Image: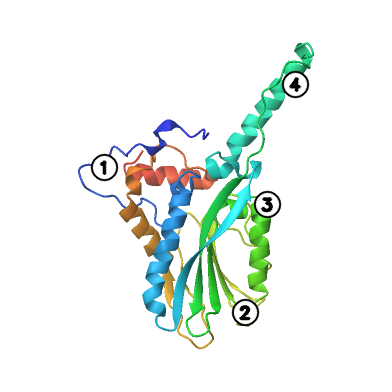
Amino acid sequence: MSETPLNFWQPNETIKGGETMPSPFPGMDPYLEHPEIWPGVHLLLIAALAESLSPQLRPKYSVSVEVRLYETTGEGSLLVGIPDVSVQKVTRQTQQLNAVAIATQPSLATSQPIQVNVPMPLTVRQGYLEIREVATKEVVTAIELLSPINKRAGKGRKTYENKRQRVLNSSTNLVEIDLLRAYEPMLLFGDNWQSDYSVLVSRSNSRPQAELYAFNLPDKAVEFQLPLREGDEAPTVNLQELLDDIYDRSGYDLKLDYTQEPVPPCAETESAWLANLLTEKGLR
């Protein structure tokens, strides 16, 4: 179970009547990264990308929403709402309590069973997009929107890395959108860079070179051109417009409590910026 305070989902008291409130953040809203909220955001953004791209790509290309299945056990605890910090805290406390129990309690009789839990596999469905050429049915571009299971160390990350490498070794373009601050980013080579969020555009005809659009919490989300066949006009994806539309249409202003810290937490400098921004907006 999540250790998130129970009032996380309570409507913000500053919203009145039927009014809607846009996200107070100029770019990505870090509160959307919460593990209980992100799965919904992921589905909505995949659908929004498909909806916005489809009319721009007709009639030569079609957009397909595909689903990939992951099976995970203990490594996927974040997927059911347990932040890493909570897992580590519980583990350390459990280890300490176990050590005390072993030192102070007599040995247990073997005839008395001990209640334990066994690892149960959890099947996770994750959507992604494929741009196909109508005439040949070939996948021209794959669009991936990363989730915790892709980035967190374990079986899920290895599965995604294998799929990513197959795409990079093929003639398919890759767009990889990372809107999660948690965990290590996907492997890239080049100048040292570090950012909260990024969009990787890897064109098959220019590999190993690729374009990386990096932005931070105070920045607007980027615009980028979707790679297609060489010579075809590439549509522009305005990521900020899509995020803003999802926020408004899905009523996230009623679901997020900005008086609390986001999960995962921000770095110290960004935390101060976030607090000032929310205070200015009257949300703290």
Taking depth in this image into account, of 126 and 262 the one nearest to the observer is: 126
* Helix, strand or loop under label 4: helix
| 10 Å crowding of disc 2: few (<14), some (14-19), many (20+) | some
Say if mark 4 contacts mark 2, CB within 8 Å: no
**Kind of residue at disc 2:** Ser
Residue at the farthest front position:
111
Query: Distance between the Cα atoms at labels 3 and 2?
Result: 26 Å
Quarter where residue 111 is shown: top right
Q: Dividing the image into 4 quarters, which one contains the C terminus? A: top left
Quarter where residue 220 is shown: bottom left
Quickly name the residue at label 3.
155
Residue depicted at 38% across the width and 78% down the height: 56
Give coordinates of residue 233: x percent, y percent.
45, 84
Classify 136 as above or below 26: below
Q: Which numbered marker is on residue 171?
A: 2
Residue depicted at 60% across the width and 37% down the height: 85
Give coordinates of residue 217: x percent, y percent.
48, 54
Query: Distance between the Cα atoms at labels 1 and 3?
Result: 42 Å
Quickly name the residue at label 1.
15
| 10 Å crowding of disc 3: few (<14), some (14-19), many (20+) | some
Query: Distance between the Cα atoms at labels 4 and 1?
Result: 50 Å
> Sequence order check: which comes first, mark 3 or mark 4?
4
Q: Is 231 situated left or right of 283 in this image?
A: right
* Helix, strand or loop under label 2: loop
Classify 58 as above or below 66: below
**Kind of residue at disc 3:** Lys
- For the residues carrying marks 2 and 1, which lies nearer the camera in this image? 2
**Kind of residue at disc 4:** Ala
- For the residues carrying marks 3 and 4, which lies nearer the camera in this image? 3
- In the rendered picture of this protein, how many numbered marks are placed on residues? 4
> Sequence order check: which comes first, mark 4 or mark 1?
1
Quickly name the residue at label 4.
99
